[in-house]
Amino acid sequence: MMSELITGLKIPEGKIVFCIAFTNAAANNIAKKVEREFEQIPENIKISTIHTFLNQELIQPYYYRIYGQHFDKISIINLPKDDGYKRSKLSELEKNDILHQTKIPEKAKWIAYQKSSDTKAQRNIRQKLISHFAGYCAVIFVDEAQDISEDVRLILEALDKSGVDIILYGDPKQDVKGLGQFRKIIDGTTEVNYISECHRCPQSHLELSNSLASAEEQQIADEKNAEGSIKIVYESDIGNLQRFIDNGDFGLKYISMKRDRFATHEAKVIEGRFETLRHEVQKAVADKWSGQESDIEINRAAFHITEQMLEAFDSGRDVSDIISGWVNGHAFDRLTNKKFAQMASCFQTKDREKGGVPVVQSIESVKGLEAERCLFILTTDLAPYLFRERTEDNKTRHLLYVALTRSLDQLTILITKEVEKVYTRTFIDNYFGRYNNNNI
């Protein structure tokens, strides 16, 4: 829907249309549709993730003008979990004119909206800069707007007040992070258009998911969608759970959170682990070799050492032993307790799940995805919302809504033993019989 509006838009000369998504995959999807319409993306249409937009259009051109600092790089390193170490790491990065990606929305908010410590001069500069931006921005389209944080909401509201047209697309029922900012925008404006036609789910699935929606947010399937089916399976009837899940030809298999009998992640290296450790190693090597080697040689050595350290860790060696080995080998000097802790925190383990249990995805990880056949494992946290015992609008209810709306054709709901024990098979069969009598 958003790409159709973009391609049909008449853009005034000298103006730019910005299309913002919250993931690279979503931005690429929009870009493909626009490119298909125009053969190539026009220069006056810019498609990017929210972080790229905020950095390129607000922070890079304007932050220095207001706050006197220019950031040379964006860092994606994993930050320490400890709040004290995290603040120290962020401060260290900024002192070196490096902006961590998690701080991009806050810095952009200071430009478009305000910072509590702003002087009158800074407020005046901001007004001129945002007026300049509004002069060449035709409209900003935001996809998956339910993922808007408070900082992003304040940015968009400030740009809206400056005369920029903002068009948001999203579904507050899919706010699985519980941010609540898109709902706040909807409740605060009368300019809301509810799109009732659904292009993904069959009608039988929508009849179930609509029970979680207000009247104006309920949807109907478009004519292209088949009726679809909902199949109920009880875990207590399954002999081999692993075989059932593996042999079910399910495009997506998901659960709200890991349980004793289910794992929620395949083994993979935590994103950013290498870059996070390399950052710490490079600092240590630079401190040791300062004035003796060029920056190129220091960077090269840090890269090699990081590779060696992670290989040693993944082979089973202890973190303390690994770090001490490089200290004793004189790659860098003995570390203070603080620096040692910072380096040790970079050795994030691979996700190792217990053997012998099925591996599925979390509901949060499948948001935005779809498949012909989906397996939804119903657990006791979501069951009260499905069976309408609980009706409050919160993150748990949003997770359930996402779980019910991933399938293009057949949705199989696996009733765990705990859910069957609480609600009984008779009650569950009768409940689902209202929606799909032929498959119960």
Image: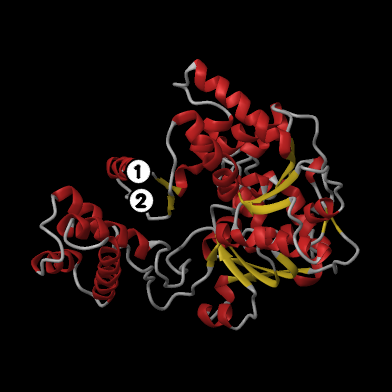
Of residue 147 and residue 372, the one placed in the foreground of this image is 147
How far across and down, in percent of the image, does residue 264 sit?
48, 66
* Residue 170 visible in the snapshot: no
Describe residue 271's horizontal placement relative to residue 298 as left or right.
Answer: right
Callout 2: SS: loop
Q: Which residue is mark 1?
A: 90
Point out residue 123 in the picture as x, y percentages from the top left corner.
Answer: 54, 21
* Crowdedness near tag 2: few (<14), some (14–19) or many (≥20) residues, C-alpha within 10 Å: many
- For the residue pair 49 and 255, the one nearer the viewer reads as 49
Q: Locate residue 237: give its quadrant.
A: bottom right
Q: Marks 1 and 2, how far apart in space?
A: 8 Å
Determine crowd level at label 1: few under 14, some 14-19, many 20+ residues with C-alpha closer than 10 A. some
Q: Nearer the viewer, mark 1 or mark 2?
A: 1
Tell me where residue 346 sits by quadrant: bottom left
Q: Which residue is mark 2?
A: 79
Residue drawn where x is 66% and y is 32% of the image:
132
In the picture, which quadrant includes the N terminus?
A: bottom right
Q: Residue at x 53, y 81 (%)?
A: 239
Q: Is residue 171 left or right of residue 219?
A: left
Q: Are marks 1 and 2 in contact (CB under 8 Å)?
A: yes
Q: How is the image coloured?
A: secondary structure
* Camera sees residue 161: yes
Q: Residue at x 83, y 45 (%)?
A: 11
**Residue type of the residue flagged with mark 1:** Leu
Relative height, residue 61 to residue 21 (above, below): above
| View extreme (top): residue | 120
Q: Position of residue 364 (x, y in %)?
A: 56, 57
248 lies above or below 48:
below
Q: Position of residue 145 (x, y in %)?
A: 67, 45
Q: Residue at x 51, y 31 (%)?
A: 65
The kind of residue on which mark 2 rests is Leu
Give the SS element for disc 1.
Answer: helix
